Image: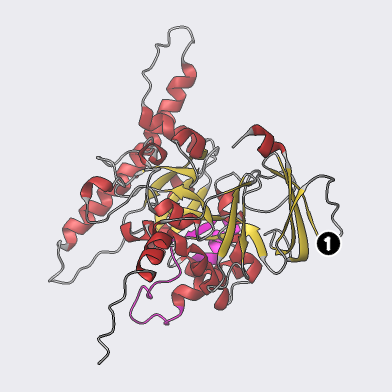
Amino acid sequence: MSALLLASVLVLKGATVHTAIGPAIPNGVVVIAEGKILAVGGAETPVPAGAEVVDVAGKHIAPAFFAPASLIGLVEIQAVRATNDVAEVGEINPEARPDAAMNFDSETLPVTRSGGVLFAALAPRGSTFPGAASVVTLNGWTREDACVKCPAAVLLEWPNMAVDRRPEARPAARVQERRRDEALELIRKTFRDAAAYRTAKAAEGRAGVPGHDDVAALSAMLGVLDGSIPLVIRAERKTQIDAALRFLDEELKGEKVRPVILGGTDAPKVAAALAARKIPVILDTVLELPLREDDPYDAPFTKAAELAKAGVVVAIGNGQTAMAAATTRDLPNHAAMAAAFGLDRLEALRAITLNPARIYGVDARIGSLEKGKDASLTVFTGDPLLTESNVVALYDKGVPLDLSDRHKRLWERYRNRPKKESSGK
């Protein structure tokens, strides 16, 4: 894209504008120049002379969607092992950068962009400290131009605290207990080692103090200890969340750790504690079955509303199974379901735009339509949280993106396939 084209002024006029910071603006105007938003407002907003004006009357504009915990680009074909790059070897990998493993030629990227999803926090899995989370744009050619913030967090998978004590349980109860206790001790040791490493590195240069080798895993933990990046703790059940909160109080009380709960199926059960500590929750998914057989059928659908009502900042994901990499395009449907079951519609939009940006510290650039932010936005045929609304345009820093993808090509191919001629009988 030429510098001249990027420097021109673009005006989107006439749509309902969902800024994610307040009520929707009917008959709105968005002014864009040099990849940034110059102005957002109603019909009275001045249009600069000589600007290119695009009439989007009857349409809806919203910030580009943000998947807060995704495997997109790390899984291509679930059944082909070589195309899966979700987990590293070993238990302690906070330095592992998923942006380095991302496949920028993945067919899932243009399909996902066609759903209005332009940003994702890549979140590896598979060990106690599976890696860092990297916030990327799905419109990059290389990791350098795709990275919005890399690393943006360190991930911690909390062990299962429950023990199945039935006689037929496999593995046996004592094995479950041992594995749980070993995982908890590994977490404690990792943080203690990181604190000791910080002290040792700070002492370098003093008389009589030797230099210390850099240790990538421990260096990656320093940002968590000083609060410059959050610690995203995967914990589904109440026992896990309670244990994680106790650990923060007992082991890390002198540190500036900024925890975030990922998964959070039982988070509504401890919503008051999370709100009091200002701990955000990234709900792994909304469109799922209840966790327990005796849970209400709509428990997954109402948890976002329950958390928001308690004052917890909520982000909504689309799941972190390998299959979910290909269905990141469905992210707005998860937010829509939460809205249908009690979550305020503005909060539902924020859950897939502004709130993830705030959690990862990139809200100065993306997440809402405000003056000075990147002009990364989507134009829909209808309300962005209605499943029948289609994306008609997606802009990345003011540049319209090609919305062709594999799904559309296959639809055209089979829609126009040769028909069997009638025999006349």
Q: Quadrant of residue 192?
A: top left
Where residue 346 appears, x then y in whole percent? 65, 66
- Residue placed furthest toward the top: 207
Is residue 156 shown to the viewer in this render? yes
Looking at the image, is 221 positioned above or below residue 296? Answer: above
Where residue 95 appears, x then y in whole percent? 38, 35
In the image, 92: left or right of 29? left
Q: Nearer the viewer, residue 108 or 255?
A: 108
Q: On the rendered image, what quadrant is the C terminus found in?
A: bottom left
Looking at the image, is 52 positioned above or below residue 238? Answer: above
Q: Residue at x 13, y 71 (%)?
A: 167
Looking at the image, is 206 positioned above or below residue 115? Answer: above
Q: Main SS of the magenta segment?
A: loop
In the image, 289: left or right of 78? right
In the image, 27: left or right of 243? right
Where residue 201 appears, x then y in whole percent? 45, 20
Q: Nearer the viewer, residue 140 or 417?
A: 417
- Residue placed furthest toward the bottom: 425
Q: Nearer the viewer, residue 223 or 140?
A: 140
Q: Helix or strand or loop: what does disc 1 sit on?
A: loop
Q: Nearer the viewer, residue 42 or 407?
A: 407
Which residue is disc 1 drawn over? 43
Where residue 32 appears, x then y in whole percent? 72, 46
In the image, is residue 378 part of the stretch drawn in magenta?
no
Scheme by which the image is coloured = secondary structure
Give the magenta range: 270-298
Q: Residue at x 69, y 62 (%)?
A: 18
